[in-house]
Amino acid sequence: MKKTVLIIVGLVLLIGIAGFFQFAPGIAERSMNQIDGEPLIEVSDEAKALHATLTIVDLHSDTLLWNRNLLDRADRGHMDLPRLAEGNVALQVFSSVTKTPKGQNYDANDADSDNITTLVIAQLQPTRTWTSLLERSLWHAEKLDRAIADSNGELVKVAYADHIDGLLRYQSGKDPKPVGALLSVEGLQNLEGDIYNLDKLRSAGFRMASLTHFFDTDLAGSMHGIEKGGLTEKGRAVVRRMEELGMVVDIAHCSHACVADILSMSRRPVVSSHGGVQATCDVNRNLTDQEIRGVAKTGGVIGIGYWDGAVCGTSPRDTARAMKHVRDLVGIEHVALGSDYDGAVTVRFDTSQLVQVTQALMDEGFTEDEIRAAMGENALRVLREDLEPLRMSVDSVPVP
């Protein structure tokens, strides 16, 4: 009898453990990547027609963090390939998140804890990713590469300046259009103290990175860290190396001192991949007018998000107002999109409904040319300037 009870208890435990690994990651994502369900704005036929002709670029999403197939339509989260196609997205930047602090907040976080380790283990990722932040990013690159290989040409990797024009040619006349994919890093804590790991990331396909995420690193202070300092000497060396390697420098999540240091030394266009502006949403992570002018001076762009912490609301009108402020302050050529989809944010619309932003911009008085620029053409210009050429003719760019 005792043996039978032990067997039953063991089976129950095994079932419980199996259930945890099967369901817990999905439950976690549903709780963090939400759509608020509030009414959408009415979209005109004119906006729909214009939206269908746009070349749309989103500078930031965290979709690779989650355990689902990018190629399949999901019943959770904000983004997957079918929804990207429905939203008419031409190029999506996929970020690698490797570490976030427990009790994460916008004001002050130390680097002593990590939420992502639990998620990594629960998702049964390779054991090499359980303890190494670098390996987590390399795993994300592998995930994207597998999705591209299995997509029948519907998802196309972008890693060089020439790839952009190759992608646009490949998209011409196709319905749905293939979607370009570019890899980014959210916080270079994944260098694990070794600047030469930057070369490993580049070899894996990463072409954009921010120096910090939600805590200070040995490179720079985070807007959400404890010290909130500027660039360290190692941080300055990393910025220089990124420029040499054709990697876009992203100031998202940097402290104000870090932003100032990057802007003062940059020799290429800088981006703020996802966030907002303090003029329309006075949150510490958002850019001041002085910082907006600094980004514009480098020739860079500012990706405006869709969640409350970026634009103080979830309506597309909140996003449009922030974009309008950047346009009015420094010119339309510095406005871009940065959704932060699947980044533990609550939004009003997912990527399939990006026509909401087009309509909101029309309602704010943006011209057709301004909308084309803000929704993607500006971001493409910066990527062409920052990424290295493939060192072969555009006609030789390998696309499916």
Image (cartoon, helix red, strand yellow):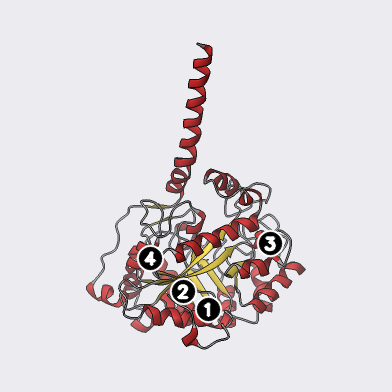
Is any atom of residue 72 visible in this view? Answer: yes
Upstream in the sequence, badge 3 or badge 1? 3
Look at label 4 and name its amino acid. Leu
Q: How many numbered markers are drawn? A: 4
Where is residue 40, by image quadrant?
A: bottom left
Is any atom of residue 332 visible in this view? Answer: no
Look at label 3 and name its amino acid. Leu
Q: Which mark is residue 84?
A: 4
* Residue closest to the eye, 165 or 365: 165
Residue labelled with disc 3: 191
The local secondary structure at tag 1 comes to helix
The residue drawn where x is 43% and y is 55% is: 69
Is residue 328 depicted above or below 127 in this figure?
below
Label 2 and label 3: CA atoms lie apart by: 28 Å
Residue labelled with disc 1: 383
Q: Which mark is residue 336?
A: 2
